[in-house]
């Protein structure tokens, strides 16, 4: 075993996909009361193997456990594709799936993760198409090789019908604080927030029918949309929407999340941090003026 402070180097042959450890130290906890950090930079070499090196940080107990530690690290390095390239035509359901649209709707115009929209513990994802967005629920059972988006019934996923601008569908975060991930889609002139919920999604959700309880519409901006995180640190996710034609200059607007409800339709010019009817404040406004 190496002397205290020595750096151990282990080489794993064959191409691998490194998961979870790159760019941060691997936390290793020996028996209490001491806790040690193991540095784990991972480097590829021309032979196609990966070289993992870590410091044992002058801890004899940690040195004695080095073989077990290496085994732990190996379990977090998943086999990748032998050639280093995956042909999408080779997806089999075991290594990925293909989700096909219907007709000439241009499915895939926008794609994004959605967070956990239905609260089942699996992350969901979004596929934008012409005038609609498909929401597909994640699941432990995986997906078949090919999934027809036109067959979604509300159980595996559902459709949000309404215009979608290019790259205009995104996860919004939990805007209303109910514990479910929400979705925001933009159609160029407006943005629509659809609230997540435990169950009961129909096969189609029309943005024109949002009533404030299942989601709401922001009129006046929808060229670009995104979740913004918790900008004002009140515990609710916020959203940001853009209108590149606003006043001939363009503007982006932050809308704060809250739990006391939203109107079915809000004009972007009527949204403020105080909830009054004065003009909206673009996201580019300086903190001092807010």
Image (spheres, rainbow, N blue to C red):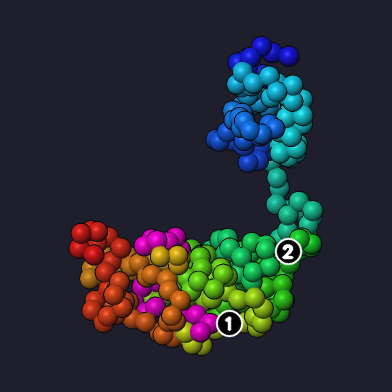
In the displayed structure, does residue 79 sit left or right of residue 224? right
Residue 157 falls in image quadrant: bottom right
- Judge by depth and name the residue closer to the eye, 116 or 91: 116
Q: How far across and how far down the image is residue 270, in percent?
A: 29, 80
**Span colored in magenta:** 213-233
For disc 2, the marked residue is 139
Q: CA distance from mark 2 to mark 1?
A: 21 Å
Q: Residue at x 62, y 82 (%)?
A: 204
In the displayed structure, does residue 79 sit left or right of residue 130? right
Q: Residue at x 23, y 58 (%)?
A: 286
Mark 1: secondary structure: strand
Mark 2: secondary structure: loop
Can residue 84 be seen here? The reply is no
- Judge by depth and name the residue closer to the eye, 25 or 181: 25
For disc 1, the marked residue is 205
Q: Quadrant of the N terminus?
A: top right
Q: How far across and how far down the image is residue 273, in percent?
A: 30, 71
Q: Residue at x 33, y 67 (%)?
A: 253
Q: How far across and how far down the image is residue 40, in percent?
A: 61, 29
Can residue 202 be seen here? The reply is yes
């Amino acid at each position: 075993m190496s002397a205290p402070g020595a750096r151990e180097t282990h080489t794993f042959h064959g191409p691998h996909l490194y998961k979870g450890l790159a760019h941060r130290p691997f936390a290793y906890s020996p028996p209490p009361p001491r806790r040690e950090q193991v540095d784990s930079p991972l480097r590829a070499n021309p032979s196609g193997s990966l070289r993992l090196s870590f410091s044992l940080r002058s801890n004899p107990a940690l040195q004695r456990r080095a073989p077990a530690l290496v085994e732990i690290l190996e379990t977090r390095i998943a086999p990748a594709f032998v050639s280093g390239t995956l042909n999408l035509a080779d997806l089999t359901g075991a290594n990925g799936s293909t989700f096909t649209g219907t007709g000439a709707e241009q499915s895939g115009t926008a794609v994004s993760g959605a967070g956990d929209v239905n609260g089942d513990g699996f992350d969901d994802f979004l596929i934008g198409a012409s005038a609609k967005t498909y929401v597909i629920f994640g699941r432990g059972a995986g997906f078949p090789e090919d999934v027809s988006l036109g067959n979604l019934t509300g159980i595996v996923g559902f459709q949000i019908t309404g215009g979608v601008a290019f790259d205009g569908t995104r996860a919004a975060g939990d805007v209303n604080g109910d514990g479910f991930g929400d979705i925001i889609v933009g159609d160029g002139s407006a943005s629509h927030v659809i609230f997540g919920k435990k169950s009961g999604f129909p096969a189609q959700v029309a943005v024109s029918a949002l009533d404030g309880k299942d989601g709401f519409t922001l009129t006046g901006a929808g060229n670009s949309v995104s979740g913004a995180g918790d900008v004002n640190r009140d515990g609710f996710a916020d959203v940001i929407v853009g209108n590149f034609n606003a006043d001939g200059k363009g503007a982006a607007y932050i809308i704060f999340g809250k739990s006391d409800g939203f109107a079915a339709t809000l004009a972007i010019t009527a949204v403020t941090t105080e909830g009054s009817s004065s003009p909206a404040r673009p996201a580019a406004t300086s903190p001092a003026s807010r």
